[in-house]
Image: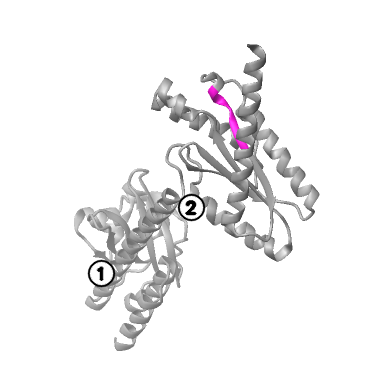
């Protein structure tokens, strides 16, 4: 008994998954019960199915992993409903069980595996084709092992919920709630990664700044809901013309930015930067419900061997130069019309 408890302690401490925990427990359960098949099942009550997840077979009885049987006809269900954890004469007590007949089970022992809410989520079982008595030690081991497995399942469930919560919080921390785009923090992280790679291989990094023209007037004339709608529309339009390798982000109010890898050759890098700038300009100056307020000012630069702040400042300068040039052309056009 002491050696079994020592092995049990080692098994529980070392297990990193349900399988790593269960297989040694099944081996110990086989020794303690003396039955030829021991196995762990899971129960899907909604689907009405019981599945054998892990099994150990050492005799004529073969309980296969992956075996699925209707939950309503299983011996486990009968054990739970009748409060009978063990029987050595299945053919007499549950002679109508088709599952027991098909497998030839005569001795059967089962302990429920329960979730934190008390619901039965699985069973730990031992079975044999021969009629065989099971002593108190074997029954205690069956109950103990089922509780250990239940605790592990609950821990895995809680760890899964924690992992999903952390993933959600991470996405939330790096995502703009209105547009669904990455936010400033995500953009800065990506820019830092791209600049670090560029420092190693000598390539260029493309950095762009985008500002919505007269956005305040849209809010003032049409309302904040219209402003939000315009922001989302612009986000979709620009996303449609940037490359798959680029990251488009909303970094504040009516400002967007994008970063992406450039070429090794300087001329090619600047050509790509200008091409992307032109495509963004064309996308942003399409038809809109907000007429003359619908344009974008865009600055795109190809940089290397600079800091993230320097790269953003260069793109920002290029964007404001574009904004001033666009205003100058609009004033000239208005003067000509007058």
Q: Quadrant of the C terminus?
A: top right
Q: Is residue 229 or residue 298 the one in the foreground?
A: 298
Q: Is residue 117 left or right of residue 321?
A: left
- Which residue corresponds to the image point at 59% horizontal and 37% vertical from the top-left? 239
- Which residue corresponds to the image point at 35% horizontal and 45% vertical from the top-left? 48
- As helix, strand or loop, the secondary structure at mark 1 comes to helix
- As helix, strand or loop, the secondary structure at mark 2 comes to helix
Q: Is residue 90 visible?
A: yes
* Spatial separation of the CA atoms under disc 2 and disc 1: 51 Å
Which color mode does the image show?
Answer: one colour
The earlier-in-sequence mark between 2 and 1 is 1
Q: Is residue 107 left or right of residue 319?
A: left
Q: Is residue 200 or residue 333 the one in the foreground?
A: 333
Which stretch is magenta?
Answer: 293-298
Residue 243 at x, y = what percent? Answer: 66, 42
Q: Is residue 10 left or right of residue 310?
A: left
Report which residue position mark 2 lands on: 185
Q: Is residue 290 magenta?
A: no
- Which residue corresponds to the image point at 59% horizontal and 45% vertical from the top-left? 316
Residue 191 at x, y = what percent? Answer: 59, 54
Q: Is residue 112 or residue 103 the one in the foreground?
A: 112
The image quadrant of residue 37 is: bottom left
Q: Quadrant of the N terminus?
A: bottom left
Report which residue position mark 1 lands on: 143
- Which residue corresponds to the image point at 39% horizontal and 69% vertical from the top-left? 22
Q: Is residue 106 visible?
A: no
Disc tally is 2
């Amino acid at each position: 008994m002491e050696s079994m408890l020592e092995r049990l302690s080692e098994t529980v401490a070392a297990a990193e998954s349900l399988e790593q925990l269960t297989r040694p427990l099944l081996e110990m359960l086989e020794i303690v019960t003396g039955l030829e098949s021991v196995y762990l099942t899971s129960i899907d009550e909604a689907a009405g199915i019981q599945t054998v997840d892990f099994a150990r077979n050492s005799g004529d009885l073969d309980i296969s992993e992956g075996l699925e049987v209707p939950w309503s006809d299983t011996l486990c269900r009968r054990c739970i409903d009748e409060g009978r954890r063990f029987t050595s004469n299945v053919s007499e007590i549950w002679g109508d069980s088709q599952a027991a007949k098909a497998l030839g089970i005569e001795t059967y022992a089962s302990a429920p595996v329960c979730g934190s809410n008390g619901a039965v989520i699985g069973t730990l079982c031992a079975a044999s084709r021969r009629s065989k008595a099971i002593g108190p030690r074997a029954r205690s081991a069956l109950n103990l092992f089922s509780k250990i497995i239940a605790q592990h399942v609950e821990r895995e469930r809680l760890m899964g919920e924690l992992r999903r919560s952390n993933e959600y919080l991470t996405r939330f921390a790096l995502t703009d709630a209105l547009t669904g785009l990455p936010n400033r923090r995500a953009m800065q992280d990506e820019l830092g990664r791209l600049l670090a790679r560029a420092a190693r291989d000598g390539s260029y990094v493309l950095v762009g700044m985008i500002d919505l023209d007269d956005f305040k007037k849209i809010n003032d004339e049409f309302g904040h809901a219209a402003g939000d709608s315009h922001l989302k529309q612009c986000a979709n339009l620009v996303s449609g013309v940037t490359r798959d390798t680029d990251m488009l982000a909303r970094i504040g109010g009516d400002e967007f930015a994008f970063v992406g890898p450039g070429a090794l050759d300087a001329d090619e890098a600047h050509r790509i930067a200008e091409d992307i700038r032109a495509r963004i300009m064309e996308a942003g100056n399409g038809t809109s419900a907000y007429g003359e307020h619908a344009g974008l000012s865009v600055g795109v630069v190809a940089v290397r061997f600079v800091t993230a702040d320097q790269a953003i400042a260069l793109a920002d300068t290029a964007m404001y130069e574009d904004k001033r040039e666009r205003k100058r052309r609009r004033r000239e056009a208005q003067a000509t019309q007058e």
